Amino acid sequence: MKEVLNPARIIEVSMGFLASKTMLTAIKLELFTELGSNAFTGEQLQSKMGFHERGTWDFLDTLLSLHFLEREGNGKEALYSNTAETALFLDKNSPHYIGGTFEMLNDRTYLHWGDLEDGLKTGQPQSEIKHTGENFFEKLYASPQALRQFMGAMTGLQMGSFMALAHLFDFSKYDSVCDIGGASGMFSIQTALNHADIHCITFDLPPVAPIAKENIDRFALSSRIDIVSGDFFAQDFPKADLYIMGNILHDWDLEQKKFLIRKAYDALPANGALIIVEDVIDDERRHNTFGLLMSLHMLIEGGDAFNFTAADFTGWATEAGFSEVATLPLSPTASALIAFKK
């Protein structure tokens, strides 16, 4: 029998932004934080959240169908609550909150992606610089509030990968690790929590230091983690046996990527290693949709910036002098690429 084609998947993907915006709105309005460990009826949530009756149940039940809420019962007396995942990752009172990522997606990224067509035709960024001439990062570091949102966003994107890396990688061969572009210090925190014998350094620009300190103090790890301020392009890397760059290389063009890799190689001692954590595109460029989307996102944000495959990184690392590169999967989309120095 001849196969009958169905456009259902095409429709689902093309309208995927409806589900995305529903989720982003729930986070923006702090629905999951309001729920916390409690369960409320739709009417109670309508009152607490200031919703109009017309949208309340459609909104809540859409989140239920997307598996972001749980519901006990049916009808007006039914009780809504967080899932295990939303309680852990989307309640602002949780130490594992990652909603900063989605707050930034809602407030700026969602709008910039509306200009993808222009990005594809021009190869130019479609972020703030297109409209104001201002570089996003320069403006970011001048605004404490914007910087905190961005650091929260980076924490959200990286938390799962850092937690996995802290459990899966063998740190026993190394006495010290330095996170290049350490942002809020979350990699150092996860590593220190899971490996008592390693000393951690988080290295980033001076305006980031107070945010990293707050996080490190919250976990009572100030004796285990040093905060060093500096520009990783302009200044020497702090001395360490192991360097990590988490979602750093994708921000730069090819020459800048190679520069940072070579700089890490030169700074490492013998038997040291460089770990790159990224949403690595599969070598055939067929399967890791998220990694490919992130590369398009780098076009939107920075023009010449791009994501890459393990084969790409292996070539750059070998060129810099590293002897071997291994891949450690961390999630369905993210991997650690580990370059070893003899």
Image: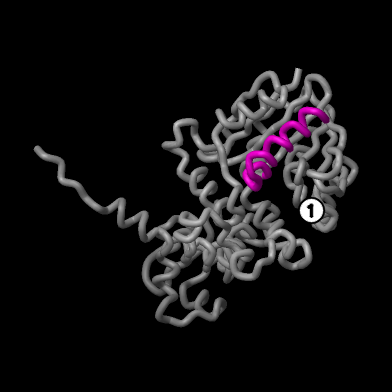
Q: Is residue 126 above or below residue 196?
A: below
What residue occupies the far left of the structure in this picture?
A: 1
Can you say whether 266 is above or below 218 in the image? above
Q: Nearer the viewer, residue 323 or 121?
A: 121
Q: Position of residue 210 (x, y in %)?
A: 84, 57
User: Looking at the figure, which quarter contains the C terminus?
Assistant: top right
Task: Name the residue that disc number 1 marks.
Answer: 215
Could you tell me which residue is drawn at 58 percent across and 53 percent down? 303
Q: Magenta stretch containing residue 263, yes or no? A: yes
Please name the residue shown 58% across and 45% down the image: 306
Q: Quadrant of residue 174?
A: top right
- Provide the residue span drawn in magenta: 248-267
- Give x and y (percent) for residue 122: 50, 56
The answer, for residue 197, to whether it is visible in the render is no
Number of labels in the image equals: 1
- Taking the image as shown, residue 156 lies to the left or right of residue 287, namely right
Q: Residue at x 67, y 39 (%)?
A: 255
* Label 1 crowd (10 A; few <14 / some 14-19 / many >=20): some
| Quadrant in which the N terminus appears | top left
Residue at 77 percent of width and 41 percent of height: 180
